[in-house]
């Protein structure tokens, strides 16, 4: 069973996100308290879908020695194959989501963490970008359930 291992929000870019036990997700916007919710994220001005929520596998972060918050993803899950959720509807907590595309690691993360090679070590395991289809709450310990 796949479960939520951590939830993170950040009001400003370049700051390490803050862990919360529970967050409210709003359709089309993301998590309250996060910069992307109010359109102030580094990539908010880019068009397209999949900017409301980012997820990453706890196992991938542990393999490379990167802390959950330092990954700068919103939701860390354990026991999920996130790459398989592109184009798939799923529920995390009581929030319905649609996986849009992989969230590959970028040079920005490597620079923030001051770790050359981090991009390469997380390639193919950087997480998932998703849209929030119907809002609700996500809490640590909640299940991630595939709906399709």
Image (cartoon, rainbow, N blue to C red):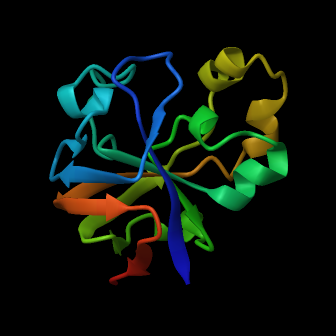
Q: Residue at x 55, y 65 (%)?
A: 82
> Closest to the observer: 130 or 72?
72
Percent coordinates x, y for residue 16 in the rendering:
53, 25
Figure quadrant of the N terminus:
bottom right
Figure quadrant of the C terminus:
bottom left
Q: In the picture provided, is 24 more to the left or to the right than 138?
A: left
Q: In the picture provided, is 135 more to the left or to the right than 11?
A: left
Percent coordinates x, y for residue 136 in the rendering:
18, 62
User: Looking at the image, which residue sits at the far front?
Assistant: 21
Q: In the figure, 88 relative to 64: above or below? A: below
Q: Quadrant of residue 134?
A: bottom left
Q: How many numbered callouts?
A: 0
Q: In the figure, 36 relative to 3: above or below? A: above
> Closest to the observer: 123 or 93?
93
> Closest to the observer: 86 or 2?
2
Percent coordinates x, y for residue 106 in the rendering:
62, 29
Q: In the picture provided, is 125 more to the left or to the right than 99?
A: right
Q: Residue at x 22, y 52 (%)?
A: 25
Q: Quadrant of residue 122?
A: top right
Q: Residue at x 34, y 54 (%)?
A: 22
Percent coordinates x, y for residue 37 in the rendering:
23, 34
């Amino acid at each position: 069973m796949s479960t939520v291992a951590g939830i993170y929000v950040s009001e400003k870019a370049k700051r390490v996100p803050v862990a919360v036990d529970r967050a409210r997700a709003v359709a089309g916007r993301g998590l309250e308290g996060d910069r992307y919710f109010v359109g102030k994220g580094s990539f908010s001005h880019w068009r397209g879908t999949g900017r409301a929520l980012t997820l990453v596998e706890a196992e991938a972060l542990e393999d490379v020695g990167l802390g959950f918050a330092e990954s700068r993803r919103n939701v860390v899950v354990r026991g999920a194959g996130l790459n398989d959720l592109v184009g798939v509807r799923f529920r995390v907590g009581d929030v319905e989501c649609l996986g849009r595309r992989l969230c590959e690691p970028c040079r920005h993360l490597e620079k923030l963490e001051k770790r050359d090679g981090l991009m390469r070590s997380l390639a193919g395991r950087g997480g998932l970008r998703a849209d929030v289809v119907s809002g609700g709450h996500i809490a640590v310990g909640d299940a991630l359930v595939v709906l399709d």
